[in-house]
Structures are given as C-alpha cells and as structure tokens.
Image: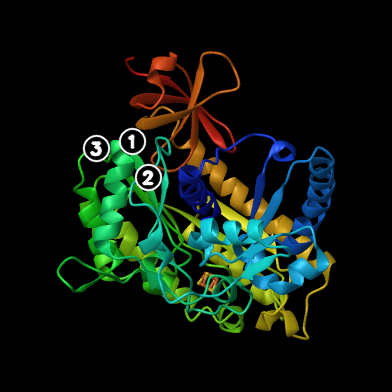
Amino acid sequence: MNVYDSARMVELLTPLGYTVIDCAEDAHLVILNTCHIREKAAEKVYSELGRLRRAKASAAEEGRRMTIAVAGCVAQAEGEEMRRRAPVVDLVVGPQAYHRLPELIAQVERRQGGLTDTNFPVESKFDLLPDTRSPQGIAPFLSVQEGCDKFCSFCVVPYTRGAESSRPVAQILAEAQSLLASGAQEITLLGQNVNAYHGTGPDGETWGLGRLLRALAALTGLTRLRYTTSHPLDMDAALITAHRDLPVLMPFLHLPLQSGSDSILAAMNRRHKLDDYKERVAALRAARPDLALSSDFIVGFPGESDRDFEATMQAVREIGFAQAYYFKYSPRPGTPAAALACQVPDAVKSERLTALQALLNEQQRTFNRAKVGSVMPVLFDRFGRRPGQLVGRSPWMQAVHAELKSTAFGRLIEVRVTAAGDNSLAAEPLAF
Ligand code: SF4
C-alpha cells in the first residue's frame, strides 16, 4: 500500500515541478512514507530523521532549503508528538490526507514552524488525486479499498488507516485503463481488508469484490489479476465463483489464518474459527483446483499455550500452504492485545517460531519441487543478477529465473521449469 501511495504522491507533486532523485541529501523535499506494521516502526523513523537532520543542516550551510515531511501510518499514530520529538520535521501528514500535500507543502514553505495534518477528511483523497496514472511498470498496484472495521486485537490498521472505505467502481476501472494504456499487464488490487470491498457501481448498486473483478477481467490488455489482503469471513460466494470463472484471476491467494486455535482466534478478535477458514478454503479449492494459498501466522500471542500452538501446527499440516509469513507476537502500542497480562516469554515464542518456520518452509519446498517439469506462463518483469537472465513471476507468485534475451522483458512467456529452490524456480523458455 505504501508503494502505491508513494507513487501517487509523486504524481501529485510532479506538476509542481518536483522530480524524484536518488539521494535524499540533495533533495529540496524529503518525504518518509512510513509503515506501522513492523515492530519498533516509530523508532526506525526517528533514527532515519536523525540522519536527515544532519543532511538538512548541511543543506542550510549551502544556503539551500530542505523540507522534511513524514507521511503514512507512523505519522498518523505519532501526530503532533512527532514534531515535538523531532523538530527537524516540517510536515506530518496521515495516509488519508496526503492528497493535500501540494497545499500543505506550500503552507509550510510560506510560514515559520511546521504543520500536522492527521485528520480523516470527509472528502475522499481518491476524488482529488489525478485521474491519469504515470507509467507504473508491467505489474502495478491499484488501491481499491482502505481502512478496516475488524479491529483484530493485535493490529494498528483500524487506528492508523481509519474505517473501511471503498472507491467507486468507475474510478477503479478508469485507473486500471490508464495503467493498461501505459504498459501494465498484471494488476494487483490492494486494500487492508480488500475482500470487504463494497464500492458503488455505475448502476448505483453496491458491488462486492467478486463483481469488481469480473468488470476488471473484461478490460482489454489485462493478462493477470490479483488482490491482497483478504479476511476469511469476507470470502463470499461471489468472490469464490470469480476464482472459478476468471482465467485472468491468478490461482494464488493470500488468506491470513494467524492461528489454528479457536481460543486464540477469539482472543485476537479475528471473528472466525478454524472451521470457517477450512470451509472457505475447501470452497475455493473446489472452484479453482490449482489454487495455492499463502498466509500470515503470529506465534506467542498472549495466552497461547503449547496446546494452542500445536493446533496451529496441525492446521498448517491439514491445510497446506505454498508460502507464508510468520512472526513472533510483539505488542503494538495502543492495541488491546498489548495490555494483556499473559504475555508469552520470548524464548518460548522463538522455539515455536522455529518449529512453524521449518514446517512452512518444507511445504513451500514441496510446492516448488512439484512444479519441476511443468510448463507455465511467466511474466518477466525484472532483469536478473547475471547478464542474460530475466526474472518473472509464475501464476503462483514464485520468482522464476530464465536465460532470455532482453527483448523478452515485459512479456508473458511459456517456460518449462527445470529446477526448484526454496524460494524460486529456474526455467527454460519453450520458444523465444
Ligand atoms: S482484518 Fe487485517 S487489517 Fe483489519 S484489523 Fe485484522 S489484521 Fe488488521
């Protein structure tokens, strides 16, 4: 989401004469677009601001002004406190207010002293961002939904990104067309809780994600479609049948489970049980038999017993994942789980994480190895480390390396998989 937001900030500022440069030290304007998901996010931002303080002082010695803005979820969470702790910051702007950047930067540069805008404005930023996208490469992101009403007890998103809101269908289709016109082939729809999408359609009705995917799939030039991140309870029948009916919708889904224990899921306020998850997965696999799953897991959530953890291991064994992200629980200030008394000792969390990691890595290896010898289309969108090598993505999000001419860059090419590593595949083109 921050990659997408950063691109939109650039698009907002380009008409004012700003261009992106590589070195922050030489910039007139530095924007730190921050994420609050990882542990110690705020501390990392303050440490980066220390580096920028020195750069700003050097710029001042050269008679050059440097404006420093902090955007994103850390900005939202810290608010005014950020400028108090780091007076080098000129502007603090939350993720729902960055469409005001041109006006806010102008205000900051006109006056002495900084500015904070962490409001959740009544207007939607998407109504005020430029309609036409600048080229964003072959596989760009497209934000369709923001915020979350689920309030999982470990998560800061509902506080930093605000309530769930969905963009109107027409706006999304126009943005997708603009991306396709500038060379995109694969689009990944984004939302903190993307499958809770409920945007207004051109017919005045509320459309869910399944219906939106169907409309996007009909666009000329779109070869691949993905979406992330989903909540199991919002995986409705219309969305599941979209997986059955739309060949452009890739057979890979990130569907976080977090824990295999119903009592931990309840403590997490996930609002679903393990069986709900399994039911959705069974329906998805019936609709799209080659669908592969990815998930997030938290180990050592407050109160997690050995039995709860074993339930997670058992769920992973039963369901099977092609990829996963796993974390030791760490408290996020201001979230309900951070205040729970029954925190799990770090040594126990580490032990559990190692066991879960070994199981998930083994599943990923098995999934990758099963692809050796098979033929699949790969969209090559990166140059490899070695000369003559291109890297792309398989339909299942695996990185695929192949020896190919540079003219293959940006193309969807049929390859035969020759070898599988833990995290990637090697392949040879069938004809190119
Ligand atoms: S559904 Fe996802 S974004 Fe929403 S509160 Fe839970 S973890 Fe956070």
- Answer yes or no: do the residues labelled 1 and 3 have beta carbons within 8 Å? no
Q: Nearer the viewer, residue 229 or 112?
A: 112
- Answer yes or no: do the residues labelled 2 and 3 have beta carbons within 8 Å? no
The dot on residue 221 is: 3
Is the residue 46 above or below the residue 22 in the image?
below
- Answer yes or no: do the residues labelled 1 and 2 have beta carbons within 8 Å? yes
Q: Measuring from the top left, give residue 4's x and y in whole percent.
A: 48, 51
Q: What residue type is disc 3 on?
A: Gly
Q: What residue type is disc 1 on?
A: Ser
Q: Which residue is mark 2?
A: 133
Residue 42 in view here: yes
Q: Secondary structure at mark 2?
A: loop
- Residue drawn at 31 percent across, 65 percent down: 283
Q: Is residue 107 left or right of residue 432?
A: right
Q: Sequence-wise, which precedes: disc 2 or disc 3?
A: 2
Q: What whole-number distance in Å separates the C-alpha atoms at marks 1 and 2?
A: 8 Å
Decide if ligand 1 comes within 8 Å of the CB at mark 3: no
**Residue that lies at the very extreme toward the left in this rendered image:** 203
Q: Measuring from the top left, give residue 103's x and y in whole percent.
A: 53, 60
Q: Secondary structure at mark 1?
A: loop
User: Residue 155 is drawn in which quadrant?
Assistant: bottom right
Q: Is residue 1 left or right of residue 55?
A: left
The dot on residue 182 is: 1
Q: Measuring from the top left, give residue 345's x and y in whole percent.
A: 83, 72
Q: Nearer the viewer, residue 85 or 201?
A: 85
The dot on residue 268 is: none
